[in-house]
């Protein structure tokens, strides 16, 4: 089983609908991230959380919200989806403390979202 | 995060070594240099990281210039499975782990 699991893997929805992408991890990491990938633009950070009570905006947080329900779970919501939110979304985790110095992120396999 | 510059694309033949360059002239003394790669239809995966000394692991080697303003990721014998986008990243700062991915280098490996 994957250490970082994203659901759903693929989703097609319509403009204005509410969408939630879920991420769970079994690595025991404190830090979790949501990234968005568009063709030719690399990955851009949407939100990140360094522990259960911590939520931080990334580069492109407008139109998104997140919830850190537990150490192992980090959800990304689009309250009212729009077509330019069509993208590939990745969840990632990393360790804290001494582990943070390695800078190693562990990514899920991605959730492809299409907004019509 | 400090800025990195990588070639948009590189090509290699299978079984040959590949040297992927990265320039980071604004690197600070405490910045680690990280490399990730993204295989087609997959999330990025960690490859290697280093600070000052050259580093080796089972996937690759990282050669860091003496002035640390550039580094090279070395794949000793490229395989078809190494075809991917390779990202050179300098996270740095207090929000360690909050990596900024640029466009990376697209590596094509020919049989």
Image (cartoon, rainbow, N blue to C red):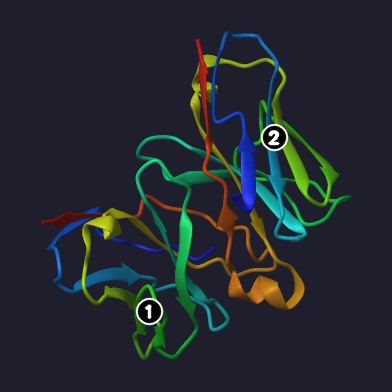
Q: Which mark is residue A22?
A: 2
How far from the left and from the top, in percent, is residue A7? 63, 32
What chain does mark 2 sit on?
A
In the image, residue A20 above or below residue A106: above
Q: Residues within 10 Å of mark 1 (few under 14, many from 20)?
A: some
The answer to which quarter of the image holds residue B23 is: bottom left
Mark 1 element type: loop
Give the residue pinned by disc 1: B69
Q: Residue at x 48, y 75 (%)?
A: B49
Outermost front residue: A1
Q: Residues within 10 Å of mark 2 (few under 14, many from 20)?
A: some
Disc 2 to disc 1, C-alpha distance? 39 Å
In the image, residue A94 above or below residue B102: below
B38 vs A55, left or right, is left
In the image, residue B49 above or below residue B87: below
In the image, residue B104 above or below residue A37: below
Q: Residue at x 25, y 53 (%)?
A: B8
């Amino acid at each position: 089983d994957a250490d970082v699991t994203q659901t759903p893997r693929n989703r097609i929805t319509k403009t204005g609908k509410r969408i939630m992408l879920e991420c769970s991890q079994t690595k025991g990491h404190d830090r979790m991230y949501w990234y968005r990938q568009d063709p030719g633009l690399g990955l851009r950070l949407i939100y990140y959380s360094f522990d259960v009570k911590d939520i931080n905006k990334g580069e492109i947080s407008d139109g998104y919200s997140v919830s850190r329900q537990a150490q192992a779970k980090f959800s990304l919501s689009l309250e009212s989806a729009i077509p330019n939110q069509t993208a590939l979304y990745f969840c990632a985790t990393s360790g804290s403390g001494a582990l943070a110095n390695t800078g190693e992120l562990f990514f899920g396999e991605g959730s492809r979202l299409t907004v019509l | 995060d400090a800025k990195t510059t990588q070639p948009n694309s590189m090509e290699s033949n299978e079984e040959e070594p590949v040297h992927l360059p990265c320039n980071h002239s604004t690197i600070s003394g405490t910045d680690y240099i990280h490399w990730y790669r993204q295989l087609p239809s997959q999330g990025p995966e960690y490859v290697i990281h280093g600070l000052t000394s050259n580093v080796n692991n089972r996937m690759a080697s990282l050669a860091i210039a003496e002035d640390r303003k550039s580094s090279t990721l070395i794949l000793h014998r490229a395989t078809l499975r190494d075809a991917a986008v390779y990202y050179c990243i300098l996270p740095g700062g207090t929000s360690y782990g909050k990596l900024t991915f640029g466009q990376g280098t697209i590596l094509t490996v020919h049989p």
